[in-house]
Image (cartoon, grey):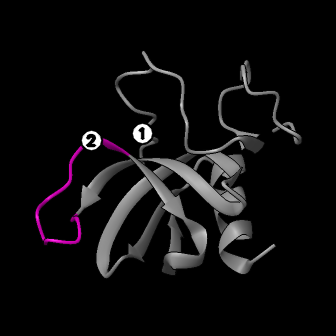
Amino acid sequence: MTDVYDLFATAIRERKQVFCTYHGAPRALCPIILGRGRGVARALTWQFGGTNEKGEPMRGQWKCLILAEVSDVQLRDGAWHAGESHARPQSCIDDVDLDVNPDSPYRPRRKL
């Protein structure tokens, strides 16, 4: 796995915020689920700050990241944000490695 993958895994295990660049935009997020989707490493995250690719502020939105496209990763202490709505099943990751939810319905390969 990549260094980015390992940093996101650490963020999940230690409930750290992630500050990074994705598609040229600064992001502030908390990773919720980590694994593989459609054959590539991905993270389902709750983006609580930063911007989107158009430079528009992003506050409180689910975001599925392809980890090969993430750069400048920094982990920080701070409030954990896990999203406001869990009404729909996620479709970002089909092979779940880690899930912040201890009662995950996705049967992650690793436990926290």
The magenta-colored residue range is 51-62
Q: Which residue is mark 1?
A: 81
* Residue 52 within the segment the image draws in magenta: yes
Report the residue at 48% width, 50% height from top: 30
Is 71 left, or right, of 85 in this rendering? right
Is 49 left, or right, of 80 in this rendering? left
Report the residue at 11% width, 63% height from top: 56
Q: Are marks 2 and 1 in contact (CB under 8 Å)?
A: yes
Q: Position of residue 82 (x, y in %)?
A: 46, 34
Q: Main secondary structure of the magenta part?
A: loop
**The label number, if any, that marks residue 60 in the structure image:** 2
Amino acid found under the numbered disc labelled 1: His
**Label 2: few (<14), some (14–19) or many (≥20) C-alpha neighbours in 10 Å:** some
Res 27 → quadrant: bottom left
Q: Position of residue 51 (x, y in %)?
A: 21, 65
Tell me the distance, in whole angstroms, between the alpha carbons under discs 2 and 1: 9 Å
* Residue 66 within the segment the image draws in magenta: no
Identify the element where label 1 is drawn.
loop
